[in-house]
Image: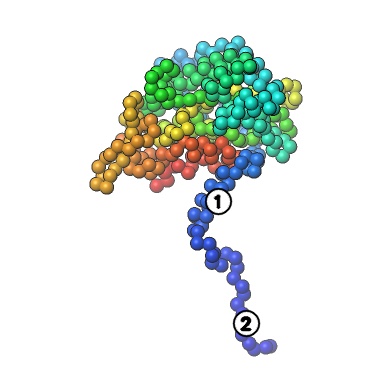
């Protein structure tokens, strides 16, 4: 044996001190922001397990819901609406016009529907040579008038009909939970319109994979999708995970969005994004598209809980109450809604009840969820109050 000093083993990476002055939490936040700003083509694909079969979708008659709004407070985040006034002939004509958009040359699509996020033409992308995201058009009211050489009269009328129905559904949903519906404004009112709607026309891709692919989410209050034919299966990303539904022909599949969930202070369940058509078992018999009308809010809106009714004021200049240094209330402008908030983004006290969500800017949230491909976590989790 040789006597002598032995050197200590080199430190493992986990025990070494980092030279980076940035804290682990700050570094993680910075990395998260960088990843969420990546363009969609650099994002990782989403391939999910096959969706679970859903129990029968709640079917609600609109005439009955008018007298009993609680019928709309679905515990699933979606329901079918019947007894509405949208004629099937209008939906058929709108689908034909929407299909014609995909037959246009690419340069014509880009010229007639230039990108002005989120509105405009969006190219498709493939995911591992299986089912990916097809081409899509996000159309607002201006798109129908600007495309003079295209005949989109039926599609425009169809969108207006769904929008009118969606506004009534929003009002009934608010009543079903127990808070006052925000002043959404009406067409022709001298005050600025406080809502907007987008018709999302998306191409379905028939591929080998029967698993849904997430992408191009946009925040909304409610989404509406008219069922033109029977037997069509859709996948929905609900709060409970992916589920599969088969709506009735000529019904309207209504999905409750993330904005409505925040408004209701977590009382309403939601569906993330639009319904995804399952085309795997339809083969290549024909091309399929989906037409979803999203009722949403202006991009500069601040989203916050409005439950119960006393927390919401409609009409005129609106603000929320903030505490000054002495604890006295003071008015602070915050979009179109009035809330009682100690600080923007902090715990909101509404009529003695602690808020479930922090207030947040719609624009930042919308950009994040639109470009995100990995939907392992609910994007609203970052705004939930955990204490």
Closest to the observer: 104 or 375? 104
SS assignment at label 1: helix
- 42 versus 104 height, above or below: below
Closest to the observer: 323 or 238? 323
Residue 31 is marked as 1
Quarter of the image for residue 251 reads: top right
Q: Is residue 290 visible?
A: no
Instruction: Determine the residue positioned at 61% across, 35% down.
Output: 214
- 311 versus 64 height, above or below: below
User: Residue 30 location in percent, x, y?
Assistant: 52, 51
Among the two numbered marks 1 and 2 on one chain, the one whose residue lies closer to the N terminus: 2
Quarter of the image for residue 234 reads: top right
Q: Is residue 193 visible?
A: yes
Query: Is residue 4 rendered to the left or right of residue 272?
Result: right
User: Residue 70 location in percent, x, y?
Assistant: 42, 23
Instruction: Determine the residue positioned at 30% across, 37% down.
Output: 331
Query: Is residue 160 rendered to the left or right of residue 125?
Result: left
SS assignment at label 2: loop
Whole-number angstrom distance, CA of label 1 to CA of label 2: 41 Å
Residue 315 is marked as none
Badge 2 crowding class, 10 Å Cα cut-off, few under 14, some 14 to 19, many 20 or more, is few
The residue carrying mark 2 is 6
User: Coloring scheme of the render?
Assistant: rainbow
User: Residue 361 location in percent, x, y?
Assistant: 45, 38
User: Residue 269 location in percent, x, y?
Assistant: 48, 32
Instruction: Determine the residue positioned at 57% across, 43% down.
Output: 37
- 239 versus 225 height, above or below: below
Quarter of the image for residue 172 reads: top left
Query: Is residue 309 rendered to the left or right of residue 162?
Result: left
Instruction: Determine the residue positioned at 60% across, 44% down.
Output: 38
């Amino acid at each position: 044996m040789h006597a002598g000093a032995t050197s200590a083993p080199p430190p493992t990476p986990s025990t070494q001190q980092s030279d980076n002055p940035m804290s682990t939490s700050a570094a993680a936040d910075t990395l998260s922001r960088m990843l969420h700003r990546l363009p969609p083509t650099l994002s990782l694909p989403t391939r999910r397990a096959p969706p679970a079969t859903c129990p029968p979708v709640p079917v609600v008659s609109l005439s009955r819901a008018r007298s009993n709004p609680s019928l709309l407070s679905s515990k699933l985040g979606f329901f079918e609406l019947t007894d509405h006034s949208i004629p099937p002939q209008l939906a058929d004509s709108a689908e034909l016009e929407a299909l014609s958009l995909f037959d246009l040359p690419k340069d014509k699509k880009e010229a007639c529907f230039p990108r002005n996020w989120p509105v405009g033409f969006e190219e498709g992308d493939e995911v591992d040579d299986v089912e990916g995201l097809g081409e899509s058009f996000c159309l607002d009211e201006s798109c129908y008038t600007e495309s003079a050489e295209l005949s989109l009269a039926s599609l425009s009328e169809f969108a207006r009909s769904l929008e009118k129905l969606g506004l009534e559904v929003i009002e009934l949903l608010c009543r079903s939970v127990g808070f006052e519906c925000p002043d959404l404004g009406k067409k022709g009112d001298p005050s600025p319109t406080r809502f907007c709607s987008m018709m999302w026309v998306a191409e379905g891709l028939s591929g080998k994979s029967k698993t849904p692919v997430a992408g191009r989410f946009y925040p909304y209050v409610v989404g509406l999708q008219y069922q033109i034919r029977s037997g069509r299966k859709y996948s929905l990303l609900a709060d409970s995970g992916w589920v599969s539904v088969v709506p009735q022909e000529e019904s309207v599949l209504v999905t409750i969005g993330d904005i409505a969930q925040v408004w209701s202070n977590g009382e309403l369940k939601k569906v993330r994004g639009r319904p995804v058509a399952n085309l795997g078992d339809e083969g290549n018999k024909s091309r399929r598209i989906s037409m979803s009308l999203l009722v949403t809010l202006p991009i500069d809106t601040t989203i916050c809980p409005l439950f119960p009714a006393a927390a919401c004021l409609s009409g005129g200049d609106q603000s929320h109450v903030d505490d000054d240094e002495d604890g006295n209330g003071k008015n602070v402008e915050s979009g179109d809604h009035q809330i009682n908030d100690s600080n923007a983004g902090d715990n909101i006290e509404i009529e003695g009840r602690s808020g479930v969500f922090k207030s947040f800017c719609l624009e930042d949230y919308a950009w994040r969820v639109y470009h995100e491909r990995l939907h392992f976590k609910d994007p609203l989790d970052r705004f939930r109050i955990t204490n």
